[in-house]
Amino acid sequence: FASLDEDMSVILEDARRAEVVLKACSKPNLQPQLAELDAQLERSRQSLSNFLEGKRESFPRFFFASEADLLDILSKSADPIQIICHLFKLIP
């Protein structure tokens, strides 16, 4: 994901520096590069989805939480105070 982010940042910075939008869009090989970045992003999304599915299978209450909430819970699991706001979603 880090390389995808870096590549996209370069493309966006080039677009920002371009004085004319048409000039930014007509950069050679831009469309294939964007298509490859889209494919990489889709693979990253799928990997994240598989990871979250594994967490849900190990703790079925996680099925009640959205992906965003589950990511927040998992990323802040070391600090229970910060995940209290998600508890009502886990216990319907």
Image (tube, rainbow, N blue to C red):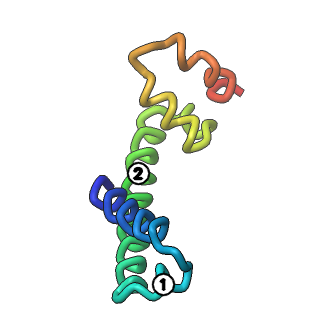
Side of 83 where 40 appears, left or right: left
Sequence-wise, which precedes: disc 1 or disc 2?
1
Q: Residue at x 35, y 77 (%)?
A: 36
Mark count: 2
Residues 4 and 10: in front is 10
CB contact under 8 Å: marks 1 and 2: no
Please tell me whether residue 7 is drawn above or below residue 65 in the rendered image: below
Q: Position of residue 57 (x, y in %)?
A: 45, 41
The residue carrying mark 2 is 48
Q: Residue at x 56, y 79 (%)?
A: 21
Which residue type does callout 2 highlight? Leu
Q: Position of residue 90 (x, y in %)?
A: 62, 27
Marking on residue 23: 1
The C terminus is located in which quarter? top right
Residues 91 and 4: in front is 4
Give the residue at the far top of this rendering: 81
Residues 7 and 79: in front is 7
